[in-house]
């Protein structure tokens, strides 16, 4: 029997191939992991609204570390175990930092993924073109996302700021870095903002306590900087073949890329 009791998977660039699909081979491998006694959970920046296209394949999941750790969810019991949101005073400062700048803003909470209606035709400008069909289908569209943040009354578990260049992203981080919040890079130009001390690693620690397992009994797999905290926590950290250099340098193991069923390879090697 494997020493590993939980397999924590990032979605984009990891569980999903470049067509944003879970391949049948990977799905079957995860079914076999479950049968072998290893629970499978998501570790993703996505919220509930962005899981819609995968509902039929969610039966393989026990839990989700969602919205970059801002929400921990029990799929079996359909129960939110933990949820954190960004305080209003910090939202005001975030809005001030991006005023009059060409930045694509996305707001996520337990039920919503919200974007500005006019941005959907320009997602290529922010290196997010591959997500356009999903955003058109699952997001709530508003006329003014900054006004939504300030006046809608909706909570924000995470705010994603997509920039036209890494240089612009760095400018935003310098403006906000002293706030008591957590920041992470994802995609090519995204800055993820979550409540203080909230990231995928903190989410894994919380979930391990709930499940009465040790982080040493966890395999975590990812490809981007926002996966680094969970990779540091897990007993076995795995970088996808398509992962960036930061992830590969940190990881214990590098597997195949997301277009060649790298997840299935890990299941075969370390769980079965």
Image: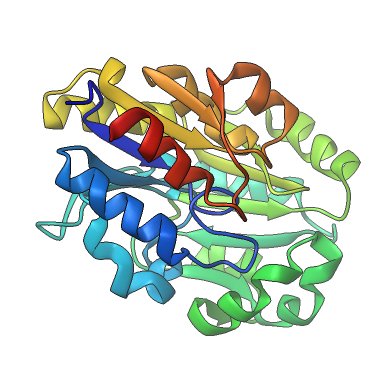
Q: Residue at x 17, y 40 (%)?
A: 36
Considering only vertical position in the picture, is 167 above or below 252? below
Q: On the picture, is 54 further left or further right than 116?
A: left
Quarter of the C terminus within the rendering: top left
Tell me residue 256's x, y (percent): 60, 41
Q: Is residue 198 in view from this perspective? A: no
| Along the viewing direction, whichever of 222 and 84 lies nearer the viewer | 222
| Along the viewing direction, whichever of 218 and 70 lies nearer the viewer | 218
Tell me residue 153's x, y (percent): 41, 65
Q: On the picture, is 148 further left or further right than 111?
A: right
Considering only vertical position in the picture, is 48 above or below 71? below
Q: In which quarter of the image is residue 55?
A: bottom left
Considering only vertical position in the picture, is 120 above or below 245? below
Numbered label tally: 0
Q: Which residue is drawn at 48% across and 35% down?
A: 221
Q: On the picture, is 269 further left or further right than 175?
A: left
| Along the viewing direction, whichever of 108 and 152 lies nearer the viewer | 108
Tell me residue 240's x, y (percent): 59, 38
Q: Is residue 216 in view from this perspective? A: yes
Tell me residue 232's x, y (percent): 48, 18
Q: Which residue is drawn at 60% across and 71% down?
A: 115
Considering only vertical position in the picture, is 95 above or below 248? below
Q: On the picture, is 134 further left or further right than 200?
A: right
Q: How is the image coloured?
A: rainbow
Q: Which residue is drawn at 85% across and 57% down?
A: 101
| Along the viewing direction, whichever of 133 and 223 lies nearer the viewer | 223
Quarter of the N terminus within the rendering: top left
């Amino acid at each position: 029997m494997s020493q590993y009791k939980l397999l924590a998977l990032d979605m984009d660039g990891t569980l999903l191939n470049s067509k944003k699909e879970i391949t049948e081979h990977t799905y079957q491998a995860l079914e076999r992991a479950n049968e072998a006694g290893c629970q499978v959970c998501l570790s993703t920046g996505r919220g509930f609204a962005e899981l819609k296209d995968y509902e039929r394949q969610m039966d393989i999941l026990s839990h989700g570390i969602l919205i970059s750790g801002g929400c921990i969810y029990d799929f079996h019991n359909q129960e939110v175990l933990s949820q954190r949101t960004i305080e209003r005073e910090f939202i005001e400062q975030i809005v001030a930092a991006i005023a009059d700048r060409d930045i694509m803003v996305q707001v996520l909470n337990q039920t919503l993924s919200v974007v500005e209606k006019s941005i959907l035709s320009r997602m290529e400008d922010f290196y997010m073109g591959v997500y356009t069909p999903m955003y058109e289908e699952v997001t709530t569209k508003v006329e003014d996302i900054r006004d939504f943040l300030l006046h809608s009354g909706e909570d924000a578990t995470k705010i994603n700021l997509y920039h036209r260049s890494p240089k612009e992203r760095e400018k935003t981080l310098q403006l906000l870095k002293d706030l008591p919040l957590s920041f992470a890079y994802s995609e090519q130009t995204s800055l993820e903002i979550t409540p203080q001390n909230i990231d995928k690693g903190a989410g894994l620690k919380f979930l391990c306590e709930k499940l009465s397992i040790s982080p040493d009994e966890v395999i975590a797999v990812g490809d981007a900087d926002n996966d680094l905290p969970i990779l540091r926590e897990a007993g076995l950290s795995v970088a996808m073949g398509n992962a960036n250099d930061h992830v590969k340098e940190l990881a214990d193991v590098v597997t195949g890329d997301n277009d060649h069923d790298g997840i299935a390879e890990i299941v075969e090697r370390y769980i079965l």
